[in-house]
Image (cartoon, rainbow, N blue to C red):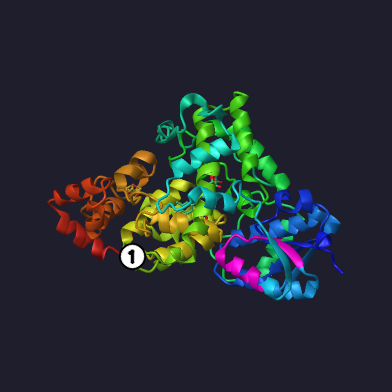
Amino acid sequence: MTTRDDTPLWLFADQLGPAVYGGEHSHREILLVEATSALRRRPYHRQKLHLVLSALRHAERDLGDRATLLKADSYTDALQRYGRPVLVHEPTSFAAEKFVHRLQEEKLVADVLPTPTFALPRSEFAEWAGARTRFRMEDFYRDQRRRFDVLMDGPDPIGRRWNFDEENREPPPKKQDTLGAPKPYQPREDDIDEQVRFDLDRMNLNTVGVDGPRLFAVTPAEAKRALTRFIDYRLPTFGRYEDAIMGHDWAMSHSLLSVPLNLGVLHPLDAVYAAEDAYRDNKAPLAAVEGFIRQILGWREYMWHLYWRFGPTYTHNNELSAHSPLPDWWTTLDADHITAECLRQALGGVRDRGWTHHIQRLMVLGNHALQRGYSPSQLTEWFATAYVDGFRWVMPTNVIGMSQHADGGKLATKPYASGGAYINKMSDHCGDCAYDPKKRLGDDACPFTAGYWAFVNRNQDLLARNNRTRRSVSSMERLKDLDAVLEQETTRTHF
Ligand code: FAD
Ligand code: SF4
């Protein structure tokens, strides 16, 4: 009879690191599954499928004799074929959680263990959240810093400040095409990647985006190298230009660690402590280090826990009654169809790499979708499939909450809508654009500037009730050409 101690461990494709299969589980056999039905279910970015298959197959190679990788139509088929009940860690979405419990009832899964790929356990977040209905990231983040003793000087934050956001909002440097930061780590592709590429070509899947060299780490060893390169060379400039966009610098000083973090091959605390060490060793300034730690120990953990807290129906929220379907040029990533330089570059980044940095997601793509009233649930689905780091848990709070304000302000205090002036300040795009960020009317009217007023007009009741947005409604009321702008935007089909 199989004793519990010898029960093999089944790893989902986002549980591929030593935090999941090492430590007390080091002796267990490992089951990995490549389920073709999951690959076919949605139109994923081609490079995302590559990353996931490459990660699974590299895990099989790295784990050697411990691992069995089964290729099957579905997970259930694979588990039945495997023939032994398995342990599994809590998966990272509601749908997968339900599925795993069904497998437990069918005795294919012996037990479900807590997920070890985040810093704060779910049970401890539940305690922290208590009966709160409104959440503030800043409160959560400070408690995370205290709990994990990160950048602390006894009970106080190092530098006597919790937050260096003010220093971390600089526009891009002038007279430079790129930030000039050393290049990010890029993995060297190997025979596994070659085979993955060959298999994906043969599978004839319905994918989006173009194929390209693998840009992101998929193994624990690669993740370590990517982290080290970021910390040693790129972290010092991370903070200052965190919110800036440059047309000729797709990665800026971002870490490109979301893929290895979301695949589970890099543990968030390893990234956090490495950044803290860089500060303590005088290798990076406090503002940059705090900015980076805030992203991982703060935002990432916060989004993860709120995903569970807000529940499976959160994606149905549509407070701003936005019902427009995503246009075809958007879903097919047809960036060449677009005139607006900022939008063209952002959508082109998704097409070419399945990745853009945060500000392009929030202030270009998300902002455009918000202004045009695209359906938040369709947009959530799009981000989850078109982005290489788009996993189920990370989408709803980022898209429904932060980007589209579809939850009516549960997560963010105001909608992230802005006109061309913001993009002009924070990017170098407008100089190369056929539109003029200052114009709201006419052939060269910036779609973001005009779209902003159309957005304010459409949602004026809600914006007028919010202290942080009330002024935008009074500014709109003073526009003499508002009717003409609204008319122009209702008929605009090209951006
Ligand atoms: P950096 O800029 O170097 O930041 C470091 C790390 O912080 C990231 O790797 C990420 O793990 C974490 N992080 C920072 N902000 C967030 C956040 N809001 N939510 C979760 N993690 C965060 N992140 C994803 O991992 N997957 C997604 O599919 C995703 N979709 C997004 C969609 C929208 C509309 C928005 C506004 C944000 C989204 N994010 C997503 C968050 C963030 O944009 C990406 O994590 C980040 O751009 C990834 O690049 P990076 O690793 O270079 O990040
Ligand atoms: Fe974008 Fe408007 Fe600037 Fe063009 S002018 S790049 S559309 S903000």
Residue at 39% of width from left, 54% of height from top?
A: 410
Frontmost residue, 409 versus 287: 409
Residue named by callout 1: 322
Q: Quadrant where the C terminus lies?
A: bottom left
Using the image, determine if residue 42 lies above or below residue 274: below
x, y percent for residue 314: 44, 63
- Quadrant housing the N terminus: bottom right
Q: Nearer the viewer, residue 140 or 491?
A: 140
Measured along the vertical axis of the image, is residue 267 above or below residue 111?
Answer: above
Above or below for 151 versus 200: above
Q: Residue 394: x and y, percent? A: 52, 56
Whether the magenta-drawn stretch holds residue 96 is answered as yes
Q: Which residues are magenta?
A: 86-102
On whether residue 371 falls in the magenta region, the answer is: no
- Tell me the residue at 14%/53% (across/down): 481
The picture places residue 159, in percent across and down from the top left corner, at 49, 25
For label 1, count other residues whose C-alpha is less than 10 Å away and answer few (under 14), some (14-19) or many (20+): some
Residue at the limit of the structure toward the left, as seen here: 480
Tag 1 secondary structure: loop
Number of numbered discs present? 1
- The answer to whether residue 283 is visible is no
